[in-house]
Image: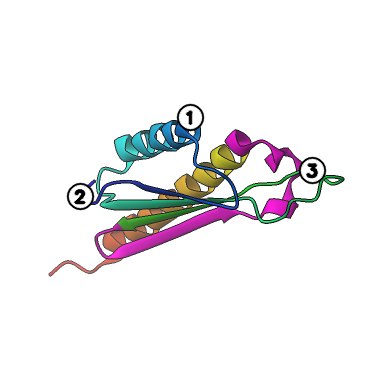
Amino acid sequence: MQIPLQVRFHGLPPSHSVAREVAHRVRELETDFPRIVSCRVAIALPHRHRQQGRCFRVRVDLGMPGRHAIAGRIADADPAHADVYVAIRDAFRAARRQLEQQVGRRREWTSQAPAA
């Protein structure tokens, strides 16, 4: 990546182990999508309801030449997101799917282009 990874925590204290997990997920993405130039990850704990548990919201913002991908998981959508690592995993899976779709669309477009 040309721009260093940025991990931000909102509503919770920064965690080195969580930041390491995010860095690991980014490295996995970079192996399959080497054109990633920037990655910003926001991890938020929007609600602190003790009775309903704490659900994390993770947003992954990826920059590539000519493209931008934003993926995330809404905190209330899945009770498993009470675990920050599960929320990170799901957000990066969504980011991977989005990148795969963009690459697939680009391949379709280039294969349909008329020969010059």
Q: Quadrant of residue 82?
A: top right
Total tally of numbered discs in the picture:
3
Question: Which-is-in-front pick, marks 1 and 2?
Answer: 1
Q: Position of residue 35 (x, y in %)?
A: 25, 49
Secondary structure under badge 2?
loop
Secondary structure under badge 1?
helix
Q: Quadrant of residue 13?
A: top right
Q: Name the kind of residue labelled 1 in the image.
A: Ser
Q: Which residue in the structure is indicated by mark 3?
A: 53
Q: Position of residue 17 (x, y in %)?
A: 48, 29
Which residue is situated farthest in the right direction here? 51
* Distance (Cα) linking label 1 and label 2: 23 Å
Q: Position of residue 79 (x, y in %)?
A: 76, 43
Q: Which residue in the structure is indicated by mark 2?
A: 2
Q: Name the kind of residue labelled 2 in the image.
A: Gln
Q: Nearer the viewer, residue 96 or 83?
A: 83
Q: Which residue in the structure is indicated by mark 1?
A: 17
Is residue 87 shown left or right of residue 48?
A: left
* Distance (Cα) linking label 3 and label 2: 38 Å
Q: Which residues are magenta?
A: 64-86
Q: Nearer the viewer, residue 7 or 97?
A: 7
Give me the residue at 31% from left, 35% from top: 31
